[in-house]
Amino acid sequence: NLLDREVEFLPSDAEIHERQASGNALTRPELSVLLAYAKIVLFDDLLATNVPDDAYLGAELMRYFPATLQKTYPDAIAGHKLRREIIATMLANSIVNRGGPTIISRLMDETGADVAEIAAAFAIARDSFGLTDLNARIDALDNKIPTEVQTKLYVEAQTLMRDQLVWFLRNTSTTKGLENVIAHYRNGLAELETSLNSILPQTVKDELERDQKHLIAKGVPAKLARKISSLGILARGPDIIYVAERSGKKLLDVAKVFFKLGAELKVDWLIKRASDVSAADYFDRLALDRTIDNMYNAQRAITGEILVQKVPAAKAYQTWRNKNAVAFDRTQLAVNETVDSGRLTLAKLAVASGHLRDLVTG
């Protein structure tokens, strides 16, 4: 075991139980020790894989060096003898800094993926969504906005990254390298982001505007406030791109159907408030994550069914709705009862998820 609690002055199991009972957590210095060890272990694990050899991750190598050296000696950097070690270091630091010291073990438990697959998925999620730039924009607000507001922005970015890691692990293949996969999703997400006003139902646009104004009132710059407010919407982008690719339909046509379905069946509302659901332990958290994934998958599957109909895209949703009126109304009623029943719980969310899955006919 690499970590010696006594040497690092970390609490014993008994002390941890005492802290839990009294509502106290690990201190910042203790968390810093765990972060450091998580990076050391992940570095070693990455070196044992072929992840540092992916051509796309050469960018990690370049970022390690000052801009002047990047411009003056790009070939020397590209051929650096410690290329693999530098890439593994940069990637390990980035994964742990943005996901926390337990992110690898949590994703292994949730998806069954190995370290190489998780690292590749991290690179796809980070670069498809431009999270390096987003975090830099949040960093630039140091001492300019209240700490609790800035922390909330970091949490929103981290939540997006963790959720997308799971999605990319389950839905993409990197056997042909990272570059084409990242370009595919980055381009699709950019198209969706610039078209939000034309693809979102009015109720969703109104909520987006309210969230943006709330952040602006807290001192967040307007453009960044818009970006943060739209992260929950853009998080559905990979599903939309997935359906468009497999149905052969235009991306924005798919998006309109996807978001209209989500609004009418309150999927967006349920997902947004799922973060407030109390999870008693680690396995409850895994169950919650799986329930949310099932809701995502149901919305994606239903959208696909709607779009395979031999009718114009503009009429596809209403045609499907009319054809499945009884089942749709039953599902909508059940979901509305869940929404109106008070505090959302894991059990209520699971029931709503089951109703959505029942609507999938394919």
Image (cartoon, helix red, strand yellow):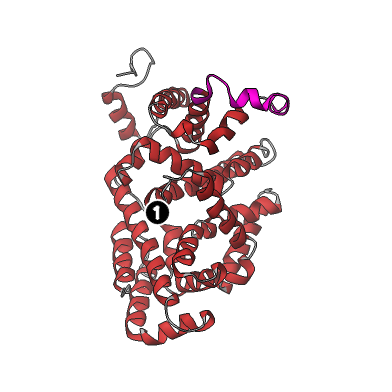
Reply yes or no: does residue 70 show up in magenta. yes
Residue 203 is situated, as x and y percent measured from the top left of the image, at 56, 72
Tell me what residue is drawn at x 41 percent, y 63 percent.
270
Tell me what residue is drawn at x 36 percent, y 20 percent.
10
Q: Quadrant of residue 343?
A: bottom left
Residue 156 is situated, as x and y percent measured from the top left of the image, at 53, 48
Q: Secondary structure at mark 1?
A: helix
Q: Is residue 67 left or right of residue 324?
A: right
Residue 252 is situated, as x and y percent measured from the top left of the image, at 57, 69
For the stretch drawn in magenta, what is the main secondary structure? helix
Q: Is residue 193 left or right of residue 94?
A: right
Decide: is 160 above or below 34: below
Location of the C terminus (image quadrant): bottom left
Location of the N terminus (image quadrant): top left
Q: Is residue 72 left or right of residue 12?
A: right
User: To which residue does mark 1 refer?
Assistant: 171
Residue 145 is situated, as x and y percent measured from the top left of the image, at 67, 42
Decide: is 301 above or below 119: below
Residue 94 visible, this orientation: yes
Mark 1 Cα-neighbour bin, 10 Å: few <14, some 14–19, many ≥20? few
Residue 230 visible, this orientation: no
Observer-nearest residue: 362 or 99?
362
Amino acid carrying mark 1 in the image: Asn
Decide: is 311 above or below 37: below
Tell me what residue is drawn at x 50 percent, y 45 percent.
124
- Residue numbers of the magenta segment: 67-85
